[in-house]
Amino acid sequence: MKCFWQTCMAVVVTAAMANAANAQWDEPARIGSYQSILARAGYGDPYGSQTNGAVPASYRTTQSATVTAGTAIAPAQMGVQVDNGAITGQMPGRDGVVSTDGYGNGSYLDSNSGDAGCGAPVYSPEKSVCGGENANWVLGVYGLSFRRDYDDGQRLACNAAGDVLYSDDVTNGNMNGLAFSIAKRGCSGSGWEAIFWGVDEESDVTLDGTTSTHLYGLGAVSHPPSGATVQDIYDSGDRTRVFRDTDIYNFEFNLLRNGGQYTTRFGRCATYELLGGFRLFDFDESLRDVSYSSSAAYPATIEYSLEAENTLVGFQLGGRSEICLSDRFRLAYAGTAGIFNNHIETRQQIVDSDSYWAMDYSDTKNDAAVLGQIDLGLIYQFSCNARARIGYRAMGIAGVALADDQIPRDFTDTRALGSANSNGDLLLYGFYYGGEFCF
């Protein structure tokens, strides 16, 4: 099933990038920032002239206006007439923009008429005018609520009543976290962004009553302090408790390139941005099977613990797009994919409450992994400098070491105990919500 979802992600990412190919690639990058996020703030025009904070020509509709003589304008290009020293006719602009020169420069007046989301500036800080070191910065803060998929569990223990405890009975449920992003985009159409997010969750499940282990081969693991085997101690337990801890941290640094604008099949204006860069994805998981015993002949607890640490480092490519739905709402979607080197460290231990180590195996290796991500969201524009976003994200990672997968079929197989199994898949999905501010 996970392979199916990862294939679907790859198809969606490919389709998204193919759809963006409709963007006008042959046009100059006349808007230096991601248009739907930043600009419409006066970055140049098709004729090589720069504006002073108004809407780029590609977003303007025609309206009637009168401009005094001497204004820098190209009448043939703008479709206006010269009459006795005055220029009259159809001038570039939009509802709410009062043109004071031939390129639509002037003050922005908020208007509720028309599709302001496709024409009005999203962000228009004073420093957004092209030239010199001027650029736009965007800061984002988000909350996360993700869930993950689990492989088929292995039987760990049962009690006298016949209840069975599996490794996938203990799940993390909703894993909550935070995300931060900062981006800078210049007038050339290029920029960069840095993204960090993380989630951390721990949970446990208890099986009460006289319990015994279902881990095969523990009878061959001796416990000299008690003169018994590890299986004897597990089978004398009064209860069994299983813990799972999952830590996921992600860092990205991407170079950005304004891809242009295009029109959807439904006639909606949309913008597109390309990205590519470095990504570090750290996924650590631990699983602990603890048996508690009240017998004086055995230690108070015996614990079988597994740790699997995955550090993916590599490069990714992708793109994102936003489609104007109304004057304040936009539909956003994005996709990225990459091939990564996964540095894997695994460790399996059996230790009692007196700190006696009955078993300790570990392994370290590097393997190839594939990571794909898709995002679908809705944006609401509060003002020229702030907007809210809510969305759904799904990530598929193939080629990771999962804690459950490290449990051997037979504890007498020392080779299996000392070799990391990295054929697992991780499917992470859930919601993110937050806001962005431009300055």
Image (cartoon, helix red, strand yellow):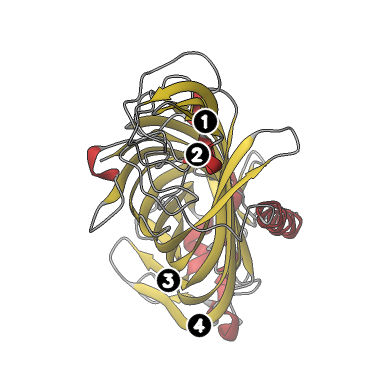
First-in-chain label (4 vs 3): 3
Can see residue 269? Answer: yes
Name the amino acid type tagged 2.
Answer: Pro
Name the amino acid type tagged 1.
Answer: Gln
Q: CA distance from mark 3 to mark 2?
A: 81 Å
x and y, in percent, of residue 407 in the image: 58, 67
First-in-chain label (4 vs 1): 1
Q: Residue at x 55, y 27 (%)?
A: 62
x and y, in percent, of residue 203 in the image: 44, 43
Can see residue 309? Answer: no
178 sits left or right of 10 in the view: left
First-in-chain label (3 vs 1): 1
Residue identified by numbered label 4: 366
First-in-chain label (4 vs 2): 2
Mark identifier at residue 81: 1
Camera-near label (4 vs 3) is 4
Camera-near label (3 vs 1) is 1
Camera-near label (4 vs 2) is 2
Residue identified by numbered label 2: 75
248 sits left or right of 126 in the view: right
Camera-near label (3 vs 2) is 2
Residue lying at the far top of the rendered structure: 112
Name the amino acid type tagged 3.
Answer: Gln
Q: Nearer the viewer, residue 35 or 356?
A: 35
Residue identified by numbered label 3: 349
SS of the residue at dot 4? strand
SS of the residue at dot 1? strand
Name the amino acid type tagged 4.
Answer: Asn
First-in-chain label (1 vs 2): 2
Label 3 close to label 1 by CB (< 8 Å): no
88 sits left or right of 133 in the view: right
Label 4 close to label 3 by CB (< 8 Å): no
